[in-house]
Image: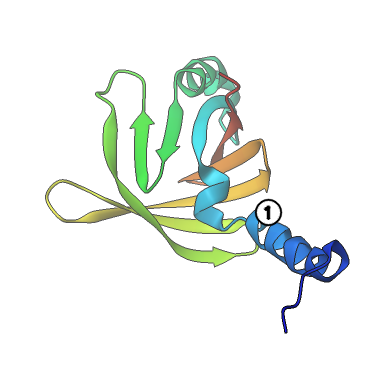
Amino acid sequence: MTRSLSLRSVAPFVALLGAAACSKGPQDKLQGRWVGAAVENVPPDQEARAGGWVKATSFEFKGSKLTVNLPAEEPRSGEFKVARAQGNRLTLQVSRPDGSADEAALVLADENTLAWDIGNERVVKLRRAVD
C-alpha cells in the first residue's frame, strides 16, 4: 500500500522548518559590517575628538571571524565566540595571535544597532552598514 502526502499533511512540517530557519542565534545576528555612529558619556571638551574617532571605527563579522578597525591602528582580526548571552547583552571572546583572548561587551539594541561598552561608562554605538 503506497501513501501519498497531501500538501495539507506536509504544511505543518514545512512551517516548522521555516520557523527554525528564521531563528537566529547571537553569532548570526552579528554577521556583517557595523560602522561607528555615536559615543555616549564623553566629557563635553572631548566630544568632537571622540566623535571623529567613532566615525572611523568599524566591526566586521564574517562567520566566526571579527575584524576591528580603529583609527590610527592596523585592523585587528581574530576568531570570536559568544561567551555569554543574556537577552540582548553579549560577551564576546576574541582570540589574539598569541593564544590569549580579549573580551568585548556588546548590546544588540535592535537588528541595526549595536552598542559596545568601552569602559568608564562610555558606550560606542554602531549601526549596521548597508553596502
Residue at the (36%, 33%) spot, across then down: 68
Q: Where is residue 97 in the image (x, y as percent from the top left)?
A: 15, 46
SS label for mark 1: helix
Looking at the picture, tell me which residue is in the foreground, 47 or 129. 129
Label 1 neighbourhood size at 10 Å, few (<14), some (14-19), many (20+)? few
Does 68 appear above or below 102? Answer: above
From the viewer's perspective, tell me whether residue 23 is left or right of residue 80: right
Query: Measured along the vertical axis of the image, is residue 20 above or below residue 73?
Result: below
Location of residue 65 (image quadrant): top left
**Residue at the outermost right position:** 8
Residue type, mark 1 in image: Cys
Camera-nearest residue between 103 and 44 = 103
- Is 52 left or right of 23, judged from the image as shown? left
Q: Classify the position of the C terminus by image quarter.
A: top right
Which residue appears farthest toward the left when viewing the image? 98
Which residue corresponds to mark 1?
22
